[in-house]
Amino acid sequence: MDNEQALHSVDRLLHDVVDSDVDVLRDASRHILEAGGKRVRPRLTLLAYEAVGGKDINEVLPIAAAVELVHTATLVHDDINDHGSMRRGRPTVNARWGRTFALLTGDFLFTKVYQLMAPFKDLNIIFAEMTMALVEGETLQAAAAKSGQLDRETYARIIAKKTASLFAGAAKMGAILGGGTPEQVSALEQYGFNTGLAFQIVDDILDLIADSQQLGKTAGLDMAQGKGFATMMAGAHGSKPTTATAVVNVDAADPLAAFKQKMMSGNYIQEGREQANQLATLAQFSLNALPASEASAELFNLAQQIIDRDH
């Protein structure tokens, strides 16, 4: 089974595992899951498993699915907090079913993670740690947005916890289950961490420069709410507090557009791209600890794809 076939198997498992006799939970869960998504995190788990010599890809499918479910649950909850109306090209669960059912759907997805991970014993410790870090990162981000203060150090902590921790954990669990040596497991965990950082920086840049159709979600939402790389850069260059309307003339006809223009006219985008490139290179360097294989080559290419993407 190649990696694409394995990802299709993950999708089938996701479809089946969210079945429920409570229609709204089943329908809302499948609504967001079947909208697609990049599936980067489960891909990491699958490739890490194969890169260390794992032989039966079917044994790691539940972990890959659980990783995607955690990510999806956080998206459902994020859209409640952010009042997002579009996700993956579809109305958000919040927009279609309302806040109460969106909250319960996110909770439902989290409970399904426990079901998938139950057979994996010690790997549940890793899963719990990365999920805790994710929640801490989301909380730090919300606190920074509320206070209007987002400096470089805080931004780095946020993306390390809310994004890189899940990437790192996804790769680490795949490597452990695949029978990797301690050196290989550590290398893949570091690979995941650095690709996660790069992924989030690029995500934040795309929030600034891409449109909603490209992204499949409302563009500029993080920027408007005082989140993300561009907002941090505005604060780092002397514009405080770090909200879109605060770094430009509040009398502008469209403060958000004026903020975007301010960011585009400087070297902020270039600086972000350079940071993401450096992190991707570090991730690729980590792969030297692995034997040459099709899976390790795919991991190398994945790091590049993450920074080259336009959505």
Image (cartoon, rainbow, N blue to C red):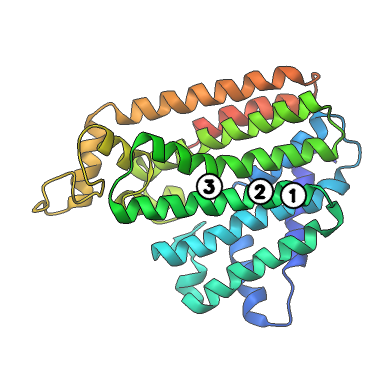
Q: CA distance from mark 1 to mark 3?
A: 17 Å
Residue 12 located left or right of residue 165: right
**Dot 2 crowding, Cα within 10 Å, few <14, some 14–19, many 20+:** few
In percent of width and height, residue 111 lies at 70, 67
Position of 213 compared to 60: left or right?
left
Vertical comparison of 137 with 155: above or below: below
Measured in 3D between alpha carbons, the distance from the residue under mark 1 to the one under mark 2, in whole angstroms, is: 6 Å
Amino acid on which disc 1 is placed:
Ile
User: What percent of the width, then of the height, locates residue 209?
Assistant: 34, 40
Please say if the residues under marks 1 and 2 sit with CB atoms less than 8 Å apart. Answer: yes
Where is mark 1, residue-wise? Answer: 125
> Which one is nearer the viewer's eye here, 5 or 49?
49
> What residue is drawn where x is 71% and y is 38%?
171
Marks 1 and 3: which is nearer the front?
Answer: 1
Q: List x then y, in percent, for residue 203.
A: 45, 41
Between the C-alphas of marks 2 and 3, the distance is: 12 Å
The residue to which callout 3 is attached is: 162
Q: Position of residue 161 (x, y in %)?
A: 54, 44
Q: Which mark is residue 129?
A: 2
Could you tell me which secondary element the residue under label 3 belongs to? helix
How many other residues sit within 10 Å of disc 1, few (<14), some (14-19) or many (≥20)? few
Q: Residue at x 56, y 37 (%)?
A: 196
Secondary structure found at label 1: helix
Q: Nearer the viewer, mark 2 or mark 3?
A: 2
Q: Is residue 219 visible?
A: no
Residue at left offset 21%, top offset 43%: 240
Give the amino acid at mark 2. Answer: Glu
Q: Does 214 sit above or below residue 309?
A: below
159, 36: nearer the viewer = 159
Instruction: Report whether 233 appears left or right of 156.
Output: left
